Image (tube, coloured by chain):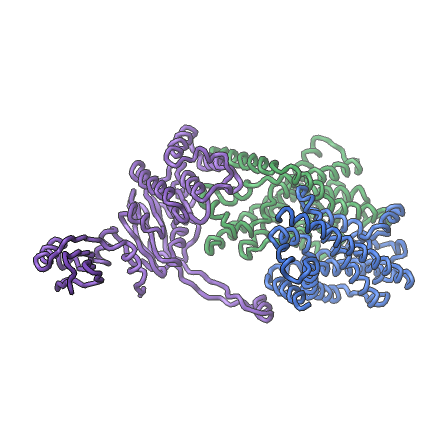
Chain colours: A blue, B purple, C green
Amino acid sequence: MRAYLYVAKMRLLSSLAYRFDVFTSLGTGVIIAVASIFLWKAAYSGTDSVSGVDESQMIAYVMVSALLTAFFSISVAQTLPEKISQGDIVIDFYRPINLVIKYFAEDLGLAAGALITRVIPMLIFLMVCFGVSAPKTSFLLFMLSTALSFVIIWTISAIIAMLSFWFFQLGSLSDVKDGIVLLLSGQYIPLWLFPKEIQNVLSFLPFQHIYQTPLSIYIGRLKPEECLFALLIELVWAVFLILALFLIWSKARRKVLIQGG
Amino acid sequence: MFIEVDDLVKEFSITKKKKGIKGAVSGLFRPEKINLRAVDHISFGIEESEIVGYIGPNGAGKSTTVKMMTGIMHPTSGTVSIGGLSVHADRKKVVSDIGVVFGQRTQLYWDLRLGESFELLKRIYQIDSKIFNHNISVLNDVLEIGKLMDIPVRQLSLGQRMRGDLAAAMLHNPSVLFLDEPTIGLDIQAKRAIRKFIADINRLKGTTVILTTHDLDDVEQLCKRLIIINEGRLVEDGPLQAIIDRVTPYRYLVVDTVLPLQDLKHPLVKAIKKEDTCFWMKFDKAQISASKLTMELMQQYPIKDIRLKEPEIEDVISEIYKRRVD
Amino acid sequence: MKSVRHHLIVAAYYIKLSVMKQLEYPLYILGTMLMIPLMYLTGILLLYYMVENFHSLAGWSFPQLAFMYGLGYLSHGVMMVFSVQNWWIGTYVLRGEFDRMLLRPLSVFFQFSAMYFNVIGLMDLFVGAAIFFYACDLVHFEWTWLSTINIILVIAASSLLRSAIFTIFCSTAFWTKRSQSMVMLLNEFMDKTTMYPLSIYPHAVQMVLTLVIPIGFISYYPACAILGKSSSIELPVEISIWTLLTSITVHLLSRLVFRLGLKKYESTGS
């Protein structure tokens, strides 16, 4: 356990060390948030509500979406393929550390770092300049949902990273994943704007649970029973993806061992 | 003077990194800086067609000086001019007449095949096709780069890459060639080939060569003149032999006697080592000539054999490096 | 004139080498090319569904929004093809690439600009062009000789301006040696201000984006002029001339900043 905490701490420290990076990634998050806010304000001028969501809810939606985006800093997609080919796999056999959990711990450290360097400053900025509305539902529910969302996006990223062992020639699968998440998870386009048929299809995929679900809970778009139901579905997806991850991991591990990295 | 280095100074300001979380955070807002003077008021002049060795211990400021002479780095103060043109002010003109080889880093284009690198250089330096083809074939004869033309630069071995770099540096017939550690990491064959190449182009084309190296065989075989720097300052500048004579004016005498002797003494001689019938000794050649000393010793002792040895260049150089710079 | 020819010959050879080298990995090129437009397609989809649900955005219909969006994306594509190496200034500094360029008898800015032709960027260029010309169709754009030349000039100026702004900001890598996050920041900033009408932003922001960092001239003002919409900050002279003048000015400024950065590099080395 201590080893994992150390790993997380090291990641946190190293992300603080590059001061320029710190300021510019903060800036990126702020720009996305601010632009979205103005875009939606312009959209809502003259309209009261669409699909049961009014302007103040939508503004809260984009703000918290930007905060979540900053929080979900995940590097496993980039580092896993590199490290595996560099020989982390050997360490896996010699030390009592499970590699997958190690990478998860690292990304937790990164997320903690992002919390300090990006989420909190952004939150302060948004509160001062625009005012951030408090969660319409219980904050606890929102946190639980966010935690599960983190697990979901992390496992998806890790799975994609491992799949790149088989598909490395095609370029960055991780970019495709990012693109799909951007499109289908509610991160940028609230899913209730899509035609009904598309929304139906999306409800069978895990993507909407990365952003849409926690955000909907936050802005109070879901009634309490709906919230709990959504959390349940998230949990199911999280468990399913974790199992899928370990399955693919055992195959990937074997492949690396046989090929020599 | 063809190349003039006038009162050259280079100072760097370096940021100190601090440890721990507190250090990392304070490093975000108030970094600590220190000043470092790498080149300290250096002046010298080089004539056309000279081969000059520019040497000094690690960190003495050699590479920094070369960078300033080739236009890669700005001096803090002082000037460098080549062929009457200021390196700083007339970079493009100066650069079209010099060739540079850095031992640590290639000037070739990493992703290209060697031949493509040359073709690119041909267009960049606007080398006439006839001259280009002629140079390539001459360089091929001397450096054997023909078989390497289709290999990507990143796949070349160190020796091959060095030959490629030398060829690339000479492609446009520059008047001056700067070589920064050209023989580093090479095997003896490769070193010999490169030394021969340097000597040849100097002799046949009159190319001025400035050679920075740690390899003292390079110095011995190629450089008539030596400029030595230490801690950023010029400590020696002159013909190699003169420096040797001045810094290490002694020679060694190794004497074999017929029978084992207690001692082999002479007022102008300092004993170094004794082994059975073999005596090593040191003497100042300004005080007595080798032949006179030999005669005097032979008159006194039953000597079977005498050998005369010059000081190794390593001794000279390490002697100079050891001296404190004031 | 001999100098122009010299530069053209060198540039042409650089392009040839870039393309040949990238074509050595066709699968990678293909794969990456297919993925790149995803983010930008998401952007236009957002606009589409917004207008579907809200009926207009700041007084702009979907065809008009698509026109502006397309112009923005198209100029982004041109920049990606010809200027993407600005992203790597930091890397070049650390690897000593500029040493190599300083040793050649050509301006470093020229070598830097010509040395890489980004094949992958062609995808952005094509998709951007596709969206743009589709939007031209949607707004019933009239293709006369004059209007066509106008459009070509606008596209050229817009791309030049975008690249120049990019160069200016990426040149900070000469001082900081790290390009990565700056690039993301810049991309995000330019995207958000060239793909949506500036009128959604507060007046103060619009002033900054018109007079201080003239991003407005990349797609907003040209789109307003061509579509006959009034921009929220009225400009006294013909838009196309403004765009051209602005882009040339900013381009010259970018050369200056680059040279300053190079000077900094020359005094500290790599």
- Lateral position of residue C214 relative to residue A55, left or right: left
Residue B97, percent from left and from top: 38, 40
- Lateral position of residue B250 relative to residue B97, left or right: left
- Lateral position of residue A97 relative to residue A46, left or right: left
x 35%, y 51%: residue:
B215
Q: Is residue A196 above or below residue A145?
A: above
> Looking at this view, is C218 or C112 the one in front?
C112
Q: How many marks?
A: 0
Residue C28, percent from left and from top: 65, 40
Residue B125, percent from left and from top: 44, 37
| Residue A34 in view in this figure | no
Residue at far front of view: B259
> Looking at this view, is C180 or A178 the one in front?
A178
Q: In the picture, residue A155 is in which quadrant? A: bottom right
Residue at far top of view: B130
| Residue C140 in view in this figure | yes
Residue at far left of view: B299
Residue A210, percent from left and from top: 79, 56
Q: Quadrant of the N terminus of chain A?
A: bottom right
Residue at far bottom of view: B22
Q: In the picture, residue A13 is in which quadrant? A: bottom right
